Amino acid sequence: MSPETRIVRTPVLEIAYEEHGDAADAPVILLHGFPDDARAWDGVAPALAAAGHRVLVPYLRGYGPTRFLDPAAPRMAQQAAIGQDLLDFMQALALPQVTLAGYDWGGRAACIAAIMAPERVRALVTIGGYNVQNTVAPSPPASAAEERASWYQWYFNTERGRRGLEQKRREICRFLWQTWSPTWRFDDATWDRTAPSFDNPDFVEVVIHSYRHRHGNAPGEPRFDAMERRLAERPPITVPSVALWGAEDGVDLTRRSERLMSLFPAGTEGRVVPAAGHFMPREQPAVVAEATLELLAKSK
């Protein structure tokens, strides 16, 4: 049974989130990616709460019950916006310092928060390593295999892709689950618990903007220009961290960020997790929970 969904208001959003554990305990925020929702952490959150942590699991902008406050606001989702949403969430709940864990969009938000406000991040578990993007300069062409794995990004950069996501969002998202985690045998009930989150009225615009902005095909919000320029410089992450990669990840075929481990503190562990694809918190929740608790024990 899922925990009660709560709502907190930030300057831009009403962010829906779920909470586990005692509110007096040290907070851990778990952040989902695309295409997913808070259910990604169902196997991780209870273990962290049982170990004495307050666990908060928000729905990102465009997912589930999270909503924009202004009906007229552009539905943008560049990386800086997702990172700022996380910082705003922490501020709205009056959390002076937190531990962050995330993957995909959520992992990117966690890395950005650790870069922009390191004093507020006790520790970082990043599934996918250093996954901050350079949205200022165009990226060079990748290998043929990597370009094929990114087909959905090129699709979403076309109007056909926008219409496809609007009309066939569940079919597309389920196909991504199957191909990004090829050894994960999820059942219909697991899918059905998350799929309604993609019916959020902002889901399509948020996804389309995210994948167009990162390739220079959609404008960003001017208020994030300075942050994007800073992130493009690949600033180091200075908080205690652990980086995890799924050995069977169908998106990140070459684990590109493994070569960026120098951007983490000296001695940061990087671990490739067997029998895990892109949706590692769902596939190997015990591994993720254990890595988080080990890191927290070291960062007291």
Image (cartoon, rainbow, N blue to C red):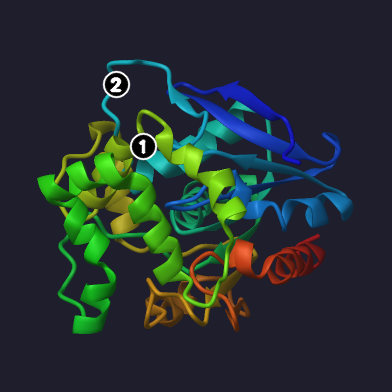
Q: Return the residue at label 1.
A: 203
Q: Is residue 152 left or right of residue 181?
A: left
Identity of the amino acid at label 2? Answer: Ala
Tell me if residue 143 can be seen.
no
Residue found 56% across the figure and 55% down from its top: 188
Residue found 51% across the figure and 62% down from its top: 237
- What is the crowding at mark 1: few (fewer than 14 residues within 10 Å), some, or many (at least 20)? many
Which type of secondary structure does the marked residue at label 1 adopt? helix
Residue found 80% across the figure and 51% down from its top: 46
Identity of the amino acid at label 1? Answer: Phe
Q: Is residue 14 left or right of residue 231?
A: right
Foreground residue among 99 and 166: 166
Q: Is residue 122 left or right of residue 69?
A: right
Q: Quadrant of residue 163?
A: top left
- What is the crowding at mark 2: few (fewer than 14 residues within 10 Å), some, or many (at least 20)? few
Against 259, residue 70 (above or below) is above
- Of the numbered discs in the image, which one, if any, rests on residue 73? 2
Foreground residue among 87 and 74: 74
Residue found 45% across the figure and 62% down from its top: 177
Q: CA distance from mark 2 to mark 1?
A: 14 Å
Place of residue 11 in the rendered image (x, y in percent of width and height, measured from the top left): 46, 21
Against 198, residue 188 (above or below) is below
Against 214, residue 76 (above or below) is above
Count the labels in the image: 2
Which type of secondary structure does the marked residue at label 2 adopt? loop
Front: mark 2 or 1: 1
